[in-house]
Amino acid sequence: MGSSDKKSLMQLHPKRIDIVILILASAASLYMGFRLPILTIKKLWEKNTFSILSGIHNLWVEKHVFLACLIFFFSIVFPVVKLFSLLLIWFVRLGDEQRKKLLFWLETLGRWSMLDVFVAAVLIVTVKLGPLANATPQEGIYFFGMAIFLAMLVTTLQSRLVRRF
């Protein structure tokens, strides 16, 4: 296939509007997941509520730079880049090999996308085991988890469409 013959996935599958709808739903959920609280920790007379953004900020301020950077990359940078990449794969004219390579990397790195949801879940269970503290998940963790799930679903759907050819 010559470079003038390249087509976007949207051109190859014009009836698949579900892809764009899922990407937009993932982006909206991701935004809400960033902004809303994900976790509230109550100690005897102290209560702290964290969003992803405030959690990263607090880690940075407390000099946990590596952890702040790690969570920043996997919670903010990677999901945003992944959504832009999924849009690029859908709308831009690419060769089959380019699409396959991009999707391979998105699927490979995407396995780490739920890392912070897992960390929050472990933290909740751990804190609930202690008699002096309590951790409660907040709505942001559900939005964030939904965003990651939807992005993983779109990646799988696009991979299936690419493998058909």
Image: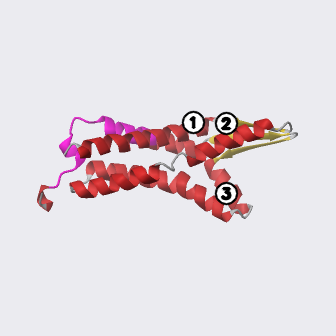
Q: Position of residue 83 (x, y in %)?
A: 41, 49
The residue under label 1 is: 142
Q: Position of residue 106 (x, y in %)?
A: 40, 52
Residue 105 placement, left or right of 60: left
Q: Position of residue 73 (x, y in %)?
A: 54, 58
> What range of the chain is rendered magenta?
6-26
Q: Quadrant of residue 163?
A: top left
Q: Which amino acid type is shown beneath numbered disc 2?
A: Pro
The residue under label 3 is: 57
- Closer to the chain start, of discs 2 and 3, is 3
In the image, is residue 104 part of the stretch drawn in magenta? Answer: no
Q: For the point 31% across and 45% down, which residue is it?
A: 159
Say few, some or many: other residues with alpha carbon within 10 Å of mark 2 (under 14 / 14 to 19 / 20 or more): some
Q: Which amino acid type is shown beneath numbered disc 3?
A: His
Q: Are marks 1 and 2 in contact (CB under 8 Å)?
A: yes
- Closer to the chain start, of discs 1 and 2, is 2
Q: Quadrant of the N terminus?
A: bottom left
Task: Give me the C-alpha separation between circle 1 and circle 3.
Answer: 21 Å
> Residue 95's mark?
none
> Residue 137's mark?
2
Residue 97 visible in image: yes
Looking at the rendered structure, the secondary structure element under dot 1 is helix
Looking at the rendered structure, the secondary structure element under dot 2 is strand
Q: Position of residue 50 (x, y in %)?
A: 69, 46
Residue 106 placement, left or right of 78: left
